[in-house]
Image: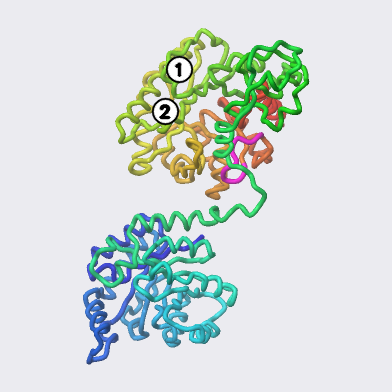
């Protein structure tokens, strides 16, 4: 983790309430700590000030003074928010002003101008709190003289350029690497940069801590505001610090993520038939056209099948896949019976439902609707009374907007509600047909205010449909979603703290095992713990394997689900378990067949 310290410094302008607001903004940004500065006014300047610069600084120090009592009160407020608190001193005498209160601080800082003040350094080290030492405004010999006498641990040197602000051309970040190599220790960065993005570059170079001034406005009167960051910039700094390890990942053989695979399918091309061909026909390349999407044989693969006879009829416009040339193996009755016993289900689209049902009559199917299908009148005469059904709401309401029934955008909100309403009517018709409940699963991922508001508003919506006899259940989400072929970080329904909200609102959920495993790798929680905590609330399951933070929809055993005990726990839950391996429907549903065989064999 890269620690982010929000330097309050003198940006409170001597105003206690303003300092408190800056602390709260630090907390909201996600930063880890706040730091104050303290100078006893009587210990700063000589009696007769003659230099213009000294006169300016003297007036600023007097204007921005907060008493030790003020600072200790602010420190207590910050600690109640969960922040660490530190302070910079410029003189050993000033430390005495805090009496026993000095022990309430979590760390101390030696400002650049006091780097050679060995008495101050030794005094602060004696408190056994971490000490940060800024190196600005000093040459290499002066720095060496200090660093070589420092203890082995308990302190961090901070690269710093003592200009306020520092221009982008003058940040000299290479010195971070120089210090790391020369001393073999962690190095921090104390930033006074005009451009906060320089902090991101310092993170990439491997600093362990970033200190940056925070302000309400960079245009405020005062010496430090122009070299500080506003709340919005602080949030970005924190976000990059939290993600830097992932940003720097990739020093390994290349594996495409799920979003890339989606784009490869949607933007790539496969071969399609230009007319009808009967079983036994010897296929030629002139019988085919190369078009999107890439759901069949690629240009590289097609050469292996040209000149071979078709084992089944190929209709005009159909994709050319391996299954046309391979004997279609059926699942035997004992496996089908076991699949029914443990409540396995297969995801289908309206156009392939009958074909997949014929190949795998396991009596449980989940319809994954497109936004156009969800808004259309669906013919229910093709459905069987003996089956169990569920429905997955589309993630999108059109080609460019996500499902969001609480959007501030009226059109997005109304279209989302229309899609939900039409899907509810479809579910009611299926319930009338089968006599079974037809749950509707949805991905609800957009927070407008805070998590409490998210859960309360969605729970109220779901209960309004429950009163009509249909249950809408939100699914556990991944840390990163692949929306519209891009990657989006999600902040709800995917982490430990969501357990509290789900229980508070007595909300039933669909546990997506793949998403759960991705979250385990991203957030470092225990998938087993989540399952145990939410066992009574899990009423539906999506099951596939996962690897890393973005390897989604893998076959069982190709990722984290090599643990048979975890699989047994999942399969032992009394609800439908929808197999969601990536591209499982292709090649006569070969992927789904393989997973059914695999899951029914778990002992």
Q: Secondary structure at mark 2?
A: loop
Left or right for 559, reference 427: right
Tag shown at residue 398: 2
Tag shown at residue 427: 1
- Residue 582 horizontal/vertical position (percent): 61, 32
Q: How is the image coloured?
A: rainbow
**Residue drawn at (64%, 18%) of the image:** 273
Answer yes or no: is residue 318 visible. Answer: yes
Left or right for 414, reference 64: right
Q: Does residue 106 sit above or below 338 in this rendering?
A: below
Q: Inspect the magenta stretch and tell me whether residue 552 lies in it.
A: yes
Q: Does residue 347 sit above or below 123 in this rendering?
A: above
Q: Does residue 232 sit above or below 351 in this rendering?
A: below
Q: Secondary structure at mark 1?
A: helix
- Residue 233 horizontal/vertical position (percent): 37, 57
- Residue 177 horizontal/vertical position (percent): 55, 71
Name the front one of labels 2 and 1: 2
Q: Earlier in the sequence, mark 2 or mark 1?
A: 2
Residue range corresponding to the magenta coloring: 547-555
Q: Inspect the magenta stretch and tell me whether residue 258 lies in it.
A: no
């Amino acid at each position: 983790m890269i620690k982010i310290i929000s330097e309050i410094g003198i940006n409170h302008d001597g105003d206690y309430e303003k300092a408190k607001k800056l602390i709260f903004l630090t907390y909201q940004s996600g930063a880890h700590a706040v730091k104050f500065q303290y100078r006893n006014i009587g210990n700063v300047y000589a009696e007769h000030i003659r230099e213009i610069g000294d006169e300016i600084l003297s007036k600023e120090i007097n204007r921005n003074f907060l008493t030790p009592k003020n600072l200790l009160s602010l420190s207590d407020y910050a600690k109640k928010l969960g922040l660490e608190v530190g302070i910079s001193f410029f003189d050993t005498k000033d430390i005495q002003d805090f009496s026993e209160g000095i022990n309430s601080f979590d760390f101390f800082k030696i400002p650049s101008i006091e780097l050679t003040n060995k008495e101050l350094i030794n005094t602060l080290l004696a408190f056994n709190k971490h000490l940060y030492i800024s190196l600005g405004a000093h040459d290499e010999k002066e720095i060496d003289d200090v660093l070589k006498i420092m203890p082995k641990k308990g302190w961090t040197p901070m690269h710093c350029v003592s200009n306020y602000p520092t221009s982008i051309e003058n940040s000299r970040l290479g010195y971070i690497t120089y210090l790391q190599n020369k001393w073999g220790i962690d190095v921090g960065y104390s930033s006074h940069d005009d451009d906060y993005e320089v902090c991101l570059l310092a993170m990439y170079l491997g600093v362990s801590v970033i200190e940056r001034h925070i302000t309400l406005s960079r245009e405020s009167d005062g010496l430090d505001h122009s070299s500080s960051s506003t709340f919005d910039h602080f949030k970005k700094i924190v976000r990059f610090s939290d993600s830097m390890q992932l940003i720097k990942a990739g020093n390994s053989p290349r594996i495409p993520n799920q979003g890339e695979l989606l784009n490869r399918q949607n933007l790539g091309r496969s071969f399609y038939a230009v007319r009808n061909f009967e079983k036994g026909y010897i296929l030629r390349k002139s019988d085919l056209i190369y078009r999107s999407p890439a759901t069949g044989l690629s240009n590289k693969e097609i050469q292996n099948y040209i000149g071979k006879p078709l084992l089944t009829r190929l209709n005009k416009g159909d994709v050319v896949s391996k299954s046309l040339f391979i004997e279609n193996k059926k699942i035997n009755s004992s496996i089908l019976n076991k699949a029914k016993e443990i409540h396995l289900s297969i995801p289908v689209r309206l156009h392939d439902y009958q074909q997949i049902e014929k190949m795998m009559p396991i009596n449980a199917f989940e319809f994954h609707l497109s936004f156009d299908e969800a808004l259309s009148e669906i013919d229910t005469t093709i459905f069987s009374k003996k089956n169990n059904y569920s429905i997955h709401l589309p993630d999108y309401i059109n080609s460019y907007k996500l499902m969001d029934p609480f959007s501030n955008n009226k059109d997005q909100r109304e279209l989302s509600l229309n899609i939900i309403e039409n899907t509810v009517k479809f579910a009611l018709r299926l319930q009338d047909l089968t006599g079974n409940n037809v749950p509707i699963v949805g991905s609800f991922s957009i927070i407008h205010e805070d998590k409490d508001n998210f859960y309360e508003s969605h729970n109220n919506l779901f209960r309004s449909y429950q009163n009509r006899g249909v249950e809408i259940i939100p699914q556990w989400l991944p840390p990163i979603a692949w929306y519209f072929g891009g990657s989006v970080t999600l902040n709800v329904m995917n982490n430990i703290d969501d357990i509290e909200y789900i229980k508070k609102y007595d909300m039933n959920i669909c546990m997506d095992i793949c998403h759960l495993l991705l979250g385990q790798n991203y957030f470092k929680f225990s998938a087993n713990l989540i399952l145990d905590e939410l066992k009574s609330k899990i009423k539906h399951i999506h099951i596939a394997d996962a690897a890393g933070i973005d390897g989604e929809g893998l076959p069982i055993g190709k990722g984290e689900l090599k643990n048979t005990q975890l699989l047994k726990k999942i399969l032992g839950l009394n609800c439908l378990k929808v197999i969601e391996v990536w591209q499982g429907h292709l090649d006569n549903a070969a992927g789904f067949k393989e997973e059914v065989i695999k899951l029914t064999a778990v002992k």
